[in-house]
Every structure is written in C-alpha cells, then in structure tokens.
Image (spheres, rainbow, N blue to C red):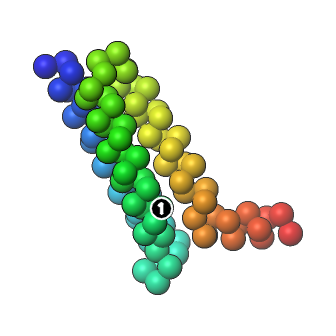
Amino acid sequence: MKKTLGTIVVTACVILLTATFSFAEYAVAGAASFPYFQLGCLIVGGLIIISLKHKYEKIYTNEAVGVFALYTVLVALFTNPVVEALKNLVS
C-alpha cells in the first residue's frame, strides 16, 4: 500500500507540474508558438520517473518529486520565451 501511495503522489505532482508548465508557456507564448517538443519531453520524463518510482521502493517520494521539479525548470529554460528574455537581459 505504501508503494502504491507513493507512486500516486508522484503521479499527481508530475501532472500538476506539467499542467503548470503548459499554462505558463501558453500565457507567455500563445498558441502560435507553443513549445510542443518541450511538452513532449516533459511528459516522457515524467513517465520515466513514475515508472522508476514504481519499480524501485528505495526511491523516496520527495526525491522523485524534486527530480521532476528540477527537470521541469531545466526544460523551461530552453523554451523560446525564456531564451528571448535572457537575450534581452544580457544585451
């Protein structure tokens, strides 16, 4: 039961972080330049982390959620609106 509950918590966090990423990118970039590739990478990465959490009991729930949160930030850094904002900040 503990293993299933941990997997459900990680799944909920993955869904919430992915939805937050999608909403933020849609709000900033709009529908015309939505980063579908990054969203796909985020979904595949979330599925991998969920399957690892389900397979290995020794992975703590906090670790899996933290890893996915950091992965979400990494993916968000390489989207077009963030790159443009960094270009404007540097120049």
Q: Residues within 10 Å of mark 1 (few under 14, many from 20)?
A: some
Residue for point 43% across, 80% down: 31
Q: Position of residue 13 (x, y in %)?
A: 33, 41
The N terminus lies in quadrant: top left
Rendered image quadrant of residue 20: bottom left
85 or 39: nearer the eye?
Answer: 39
Q: Is residue 3 above or below residue 91?
A: above
Image height check: is 27 above or below 2?
below
**Side (left or right) of 75 relative to 51:** right
Residue 52 % position (x, y): 33, 31
Q: In the rendered structure, which amino acid carries the disc numbered 1?
A: Gln
| Residue located 35% across and 15% down the image | 58
Q: Residue furthest right?
A: 91
**Element type at mark 1:** helix
- Above or below — where is 80 with respect to 9? below
User: What residue does disc 1 label?
Assistant: 38
